[in-house]
Each structure stands twice: as C-alpha cells, then as structure tokens.
Amino acid sequence: MSWWSTVIGGAVGFMIGGPLGAMLGVAFAGNFSKRRAQSGFSGNFSLGNQQRVQAAFFSGVFSVMGYISKVDGKVSKSEIILAQQVMQRMQFSEDMIKVAKDLFNQGKQDNFNLDEVLEQFRAETHRRTHLIRMFLEIQIEAAYADGVFDKSEHNALKYIAQKLHFSLHELENLIQQFSASKSGSKQTSVEDAYKILGIDESYSDKEIKRAYRRLLAQHHPDKLVAKGLPEEMQKLANEKTHEIITAYEAIKKHRGMR
C-alpha cells in the first residue's frame, strides 16, 4: 500500500518528523477536516520505511518546486500551470492535488528553509542516487516552466544539487538532456537524440548502447518505485523512459545500427 493510501485510510499518527513532516501536517490540516487531520498526525503509528521515503519524496518535490518558481523574484502563471500539469499527468485524486498545491505554496514562502528540507530529503531517501536524479529532473522542468532559464534558476539548481551531494557535471547533463527533449520538434532530431542520451557522435555503437542501457536502468519505473518513488508519480518515469527509447531508436536509424 502506498503512503497516501495509508494516510487516507486513517492511519493514526502518520508523521515523518522534521520540516517535511511539518509541511505535510500543515497541508493536511489545511485541506481536511479537523477530525481527519488529527487522526493522521497524532498517536504512535509510524510509516513503514518504503512509505516514509514516498512521503518524503512527494513533499520534497512539490515544496521545492514552489521554491524554484519564486527564485527569479516572481511566480509566473506558467510556473503555476506547470505544477498543476505535473499533478494532472500523475492523475492525482482531488485530495492529493490539494495537498500538493499546499506544499507548492509553502515552498514559495519567504520563511521556507531550503537547507533543512534538502538535508532531510537526502536522509529520508537514503541518498539513493536514482531518486535524487528524478527529483532534480522535476525541478529542472519547473525552472523551464516560464520559457526562460535564467541565472538565478541555474544557480538554485546547482545549490540544490550540491546540498544533495549530486555531481554538478551530471546536473549540467540533465539540464542539456531536458532542453533537447523539449526542443519543440514533433520528431526527435539526431542531434537532440545524442543530447538526451548524454553522448555525442564520437561514441562507438557499443558505447551508445551502454549509455542507453544505463539511462534505462536509472529511470526504470518499477525500480524507482521499489526505491521509494511514490506509485502515483510513476508516470513521470514512464515518460522519461519513452524519451530515452525514442532517442536511441533515432540514433540507431541514423547509424544503421542493428
């Protein structure tokens, strides 16, 4: 059972503690009845390890997305729409959307403590690189939401990556890959396909296949869910996997690879 099903099912004492737990508490208290909020956040019940990771990922993603939306000094309509689109793509329930929006709004506040949130996020996800990578890919999409990727957003992403002990070189690759995947063309060009796979034309066929398989493994939906990606957000991994496969097929066709 997912963390959300556990909470909505009336699990007494749902709490992960720290800033992530506090934000979830505020989000639930603000969107559900007093009785329901109390039943979810008091007592001695605690989430299982897997559900705890899922809860941390969910609350971390949407609160930091709110922070990213405001880092350039304003929150544009397109950034708000992007957050809503992510929720819709996940086919969240109405209750889940309410909580996600509340977390997004908390992330926009001046008193949002990014450092504490990131520190807890890294600890709760057990420093799992695949989850941190997916987290950063979502934040990169948020930074591009208004159509302008400015220096303040870039610096914020680098700061977040450093706090999560994620390679800045790999972060730049993720940014380049996202830019290529959203180039606007209906059909993936060979040039963009290389960028999506994080490689260039100098790579041998064998090296290309190795890079492709590595990316697939990093974004495999079932593996990510097993590591703690909320089941409700699995569609993001499916979309990324589709992009990787499409890019690889474009390169194979261009090179005449078997």
Image: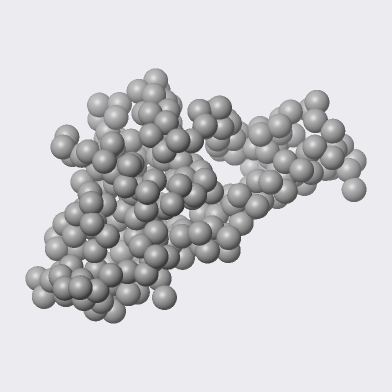
Comparing 136 with 119, the one in front is 119
Q: Residue at x 23, y 57 (%)?
A: 17
Q: Residue at x 22, y 38 (%)?
A: 113
In the image: residue 50, left or right of residue 45? right
Q: Residue at x 20, y 73 (%)?
A: 44
In the image: residue 120, left or right of residue 199? left
Q: Residue at x 52, y 32 (%)?
A: 167
In the image: residue 249, left or right of residue 42? right
x%, y% of residue 210? 76, 43
Q: In which image quadrant can residue 155 be found?
A: top left
* Quadrant containing the N terminus in the rendered view: bottom left
User: Which residue is the extreme one toward the bottom?
Assistant: 9
User: Which residue is the extreme one toward the top?
Assistant: 151
Question: Please, is residue 255 above or below residue 26 in the view?
Answer: above
Comparing 253 with 220, the one in front is 220
- Visible in this render: residue 66? no
- Visible in this render: residue 240? yes
